[in-house]
Amino acid sequence: MNKLVLAFGALFSASSIVSAAPTIDFTGLGWPSFNSTGTDNTSFAGIAISGFTYTAPSTYAQGNGFLWLRNNAGDHGLGYCSEGTNCGPADTTGNGDYNEVSNELKNEVIRLTRPTGKAWTDIEVSSLDTGGTNNNEMGTFYWSNSATPNLNNTTNLINFSHNGLGWNSSTEEGSIFSYLVAHGFDVNAQYVFFRGGGYDSAGTLTNGTNDDYLVWGVNVAAIPEPETYAMLLAGLGLLGFSAQRRNLKLAA
């Protein structure tokens, strides 16, 4: 009986992993005070966050910009500002696209690091508003187990667009997680990268130079230990054995 109870406990824990994990909202970093730190490397709720500016097609650098937090209705999350004085005052949304993950003027990247023992269960972006090329803002997401971002990455690369995700059109925000998973995203990837614009399979920019959005938040959940799976299988086996014995008694 005790084993049966433990098995049900393991089954409940495994099935409720996603629903138990709270959303990590990066606006919790604190606006506008966070912007005054001028940092390109921080962490929040166990998620390490880094910003990068590309100075050449295959060259990246930290220190050429800083993470910028926006927290306004329908326009919230982390961007990266590498345009100097164009970054705008801290008490407003700033100067247009300059404070977002953008490919306007410079190519910018935000990297998130998965906490040990966790898996990605949701990824949310905002302010991917109408505009850009053909009135359809676009972004690129890719994942890797290498911490070094690669603007010319041609693998594990997923484009997403404002017109194709079906999020709340009035607030311009929403989850892109199911879309990413449907296109092959590995939820156990150590690093995820965000950049502006659409890219083809060769890593070539295909959607103009005015695409931008904000990284709003993520969800992560604990990965069950192997012992949990073993207990679950043992419990299911015990359930099957008990059912078989009961059927045999009824047949007799």
Image (spheres, rainbow, N blue to C red):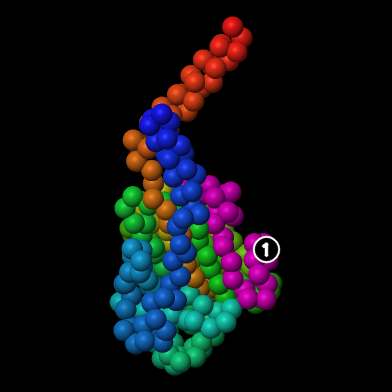
**In this orientation, which residue lies closer to the viewer: 117 or 65?**
117
> Does the segment drawn in magenta span residue 182?
yes
- Locate the N terminus by quadrant: top left
Prevailing secondary structure of the magenta residues: loop
Q: Nearer the viewer, residue 237 or 27?
A: 237
Q: Quadrant of the C terminus?
A: top right
In the displayed structure image, the side of residue 167 where residue 2 appears, left or right: left
Please say if 132 is above or below 230.
below
For image coordinates 45% across by 70% down, the residue present is 25
Stretch in magenta: 163-186
**Which residue: 59% across, 66% down?**
174
Q: Which residue occupies 38% across, 30% down?
A: 3
Q: Which residue in the protein does label 1 denote?
A: 166
Q: Position of residue 50 (x, y in %)?
A: 35, 69
Image quadrant in which you'd find residue 65: bottom left
Residue type, numbered disc 1: Gly
